[in-house]
Amino acid sequence: MTTTINIETAQALDIYSTMLLIRRFEEATERLYQRGIVRGFLHTYIGEEAIAVGAIPNLREDDYIIGHYRDHGHALARGIDPNKAMAELCGKSTGTSGGKGGSMHLFDAEKHFMGGHAIVGGQFPLAVGMALAIKMKEEKDSLVMCFFGDGAVQEGEFHEAMNLASLWKLPIIFMLENNLYGMGTEVNKSNAGGENIFNAAEPYNIPAVQIDGMDILLVRETVIAGIKKVREGNGPVFIESMAYRYHGHSMADPTNYRANSEVEEQRSRDPIDRFKALCLDEGLLTSEDISRIDEEIDSKIQIAVEFAEQSPEPLLESLYTNIYAAPEA
């Protein structure tokens, strides 16, 4: 962990609660998937919680967030209702997108959460477009935070986005979540620069840094500094957060390409356990605080699951809503 403890008890409570909410939410989605209630693809965020929680709460309401298909953690960190998020994963009408988006497309325009995106790298042009709109419309000093994984760096849109963002000094933070694997391919076998992807920002003259993405306070500190730079009109910044997904790329992934010893070693760096231990050692939280939060989160997740299971399926007529052009009768 970092040596700088620059948070107070109220912030520690929020951080621990949100990370635990994401962890328990994801565990619940896996159980629902195994029961056939959540269908299609399911990519969980377990092990990477410190990135979303270290970054997103530092944004303002008028900032924008856009990301990839592993988006549940980002959505919950932005404050999206876990009931609606769970219902969306279950394809129910009470979901954030009426059950049409599912796991990979959580979306909430009111919260400026502009969605997870199933197409690898598909969020880059949209992120740059939003940042350009902010600059052209002179919307105060708002910014865009764009999340992506190491696999997306191989896409052409990544380089196009970096080039334009730098060229036009756009207000955007590129948040790379490097969990060391693009599906089943080790990052060292897909990226010529190995694990140090942040070096890719150098040709575009974008300030870049690589940090331990499982250290919540370091992520928070780095993002706060990055936000300050962007808001001052200095153009984009690039933050590479090194993390690890404990489970497969998706629920369909048996993860037979990595050793159990590797997974256990990474689990020993668990962001939630590390933060909890730090808070107890520093007197920021008590064991009673921890127990109370654990119970509260378990209750929230149970309520979210019940809400999703009891919610109605979308009506057939909704098939033609929220599309560009309805078919003529």
Image (cartoon, rainbow, N blue to C red):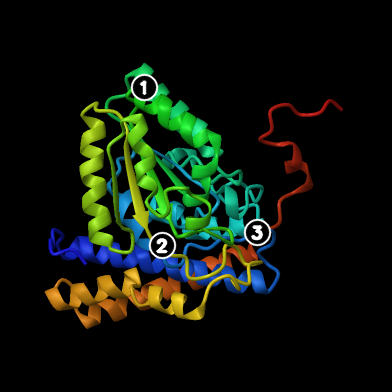
Identify which residue is drawn at 19% across, 62% down: 10
Badge 2 crowding class, 10 Å Cα cut-off, few under 14, some 14 to 19, many 20 or more, is: many
In the image, residue 206 lies at what x, y percent?
31, 33
Give percent across and percent down for residue 31.
60, 74
Q: Is residue 256 above or below residue 191?
A: below
Q: Is residue 220 left or right of residue 312?
A: left
Residue drawn at the location 35% of the way across and 27% of the way down: 166
- Rounded to the nearest angstrom, the CA distance separating label 2 from label 1 is 31 Å
Q: Determine if residue 62 is in view.
A: no
Of callouts 2 and 3, which one flags the residue occurring earlier in the amino acid sequence?
3
Q: In the rendered image, which residue does mark 2 sit on? A: 48
**Category of crowding for the residue at label 3, using alpha-carbon neighbours closer than 10 angstroms: few (below 14), some (14–19), many (at least 20):** some
Real-space CA distance between mark 3 and mark 1, rounded to the nearest whole angstrom: 37 Å
Mark in the foreground, 2 or 1: 1
Across and down, in percent, residue 320 comes to 75, 36
- The kind of residue on which mark 2 rests is Glu
